[in-house]
Image: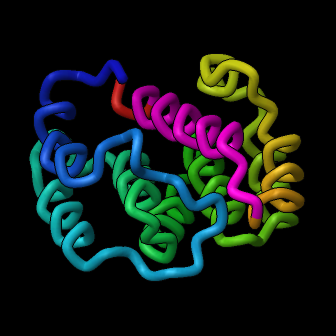
Amino acid sequence: MDLPEAVARAVAPLFESLPQDEALFKLVVTDPASSALVGVVETILRDDALRDRPALHSGLWLYIDELDRSHTVSQGIEDATGSFWHGIMHRREGDFSNSHYWFNKVGEHPAIAQVGGYDPHRMIDEVETLHTDKPQHLIDLQRREWQTLFAWSAA
């Protein structure tokens, strides 16, 4: 993932604690986030590189499965990027119709084309149907989606 140097340095402790190839493996989150990871993110958010970057905050909370905090942040971002994070959050909480609503508000976000092989509405429907089977192709797509939107938000 290509991040600006200051952002990469700030988030490095999180990626060391929870590597990207291990994160976001739950398509629908039912368990609370790890308190240790919450502490790591709380520390990261105080870094100057992220302090006033709510889209990155929302993404970091999603990365550790802290949906409530991600939701609180994404609700306050009144643009397509905020709607994108908001839609992901609702999909991951299993509120699929609300996820469709927010992705309708996203429109033609530049990050969508960068994900590759990605239609957010099709993904919502597939997650709704298949999430209990933990299909690897959807987990991989969810990771690419997160990495792409996080990098786009950091640029």
Q: In the image shown, does 86 or 117 lie closer to the viewer?
A: 117
- Is 71 left, or right, of 11 in this rendering? right
Residue 130 falls in image quadrant: bottom right
Specify the quadrant that holds the N terminus. Answer: top left
In the picture provided, is 6 more to the left or to the right than 83? left
When asked about the image quadrant of residue 33, the answer is bottom left
Residue drawn 68% across the image and 19% down it: 116
Q: Quadrant of residue 117?
A: top right
- Image coords of residue 78 (percent x, y): 58, 52
Q: For the C terminus, give its image quadrant.
A: top left
Q: Which residue is located at x 50 percent, y 62 percent?
A: 76
**Magenta residues (range):** 133-152
Given residues 57 and 21, the one toward you in this image is 21
Residue in view at x 88 percent, y 52 percent: 125
For residue 46, above or below residue 81: below
- Image location of residue 62, percent across then percent down: 46, 58
81 up-or-down from 43: above or below = above
Residue 90 position within the rendered picture, expressed as x and y whole percent measured from the top left: 68, 65
Residue 118 coordinates in the image, percent (x, y):
75, 28
Q: Is residue 11 above or below residue 4?
A: below
The answer to which of 18 and 42 lies nearer the viewer is 18
Please count the marks in the image.
0
Magenta residue check for 105: no
Residue at screen point 52% across, 59% down: 74
86, above or below 136, in the image: below
User: Looking at the image, what colour scheme do you see?
Assistant: rainbow
In the image, residue 138 lies in the stretch drawn in magenta: yes
Predominant secondary structure, magenta span:
helix
Taking the image as shown, residue 5 lies to the left or right of residue 23, namely left
